[in-house]
Amino acid sequence: QAQLVEYGGGSVQAGGSLRLSCDASVDTLDTRPMHCMGWFRRAPGNEREGVAVLQSDGRTMYADSVKGRFTISKDNAKNTVYLQMNSLKPDDTAMYYCAADRWRCGLAYRVFNYWGQGTQVTVSS
């Protein structure tokens, strides 16, 4: 088991920046490291969309819509993953979720077994 807690969401004007954080904790009975951590988002009426993922070897993948604007990173000492979001647009408005998996990685939400509760990001024009 693992628990993921996101924070850092909020309201910002278009062109602004936010940094999301996700603290990951693992069950003491299963301390195997996560192979992949990522961020997804879901806007009202839309399906959950993969935004960015980071594999344990450092490789990253981004949705085309956020390339060049968002950056995923991780502090291994804190077991925290971040999503730096710059040049935000109203289309980025969504609930953002942190996800993790011990074996697989990708931008498809079905890949991930562990999910946080989400943090809301609202971008106004």
Image: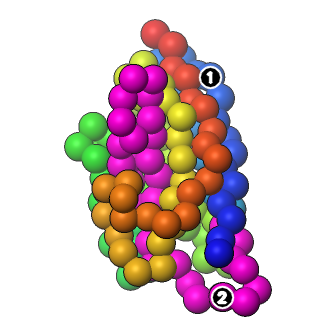
The percent position of residue 87, horizontal first and vertical second, equals 42, 30
Which region is colored magenta? 24-53
Q: Residue furthest top?
A: 125
The answer to whether mark 2 and mark 1 are in CB contact below 8 A is no
The percent position of residue 21, horizontal first and vertical second, equals 63, 52
Rendered residue at 56%/30% (across/down): 121
For the residue marked with disc 2, what is the amino acid?
Thr
Of residues 47 and 82, which is closer to you in this image? Answer: 47
Of residues 104 and 73, which is closer to you in this image? Answer: 104
**What residue is disc 1 on?**
11
Q: Which of marks 2 and 1 is nearer the N terminus?
A: 1
Location of the N terminus (image quadrant): bottom right
Q: Please say if 118 is above or below 59.
A: above
The percent position of residue 97, horizontal first and vertical second, equals 54, 47
Which element type, helix, strand or loop, lies under badge 2? loop
Rendered residue at 39%/41% (across/down): 48
Q: Which mark is residue 31?
A: 2
Q: Residue 40 carries which label?
A: none
Rendered residue at 38%/47% (across/down): 51
Q: Please say if 104 is above or below 38.
A: below
Is residue 64 one of those drawn in magenta? no
Q: Nearer the viewer, mark 2 or mark 1?
A: 2
Q: Please say if 75 is above or below 70.
A: below
Dot 2 surroundings within 10 Å: few (below 14), some, or many (20 or more)? few
Please tell me in which quadrant of the rendered image residue 56 appears. bottom left
Q: Which residue lies furthest to the right in this view?
A: 28
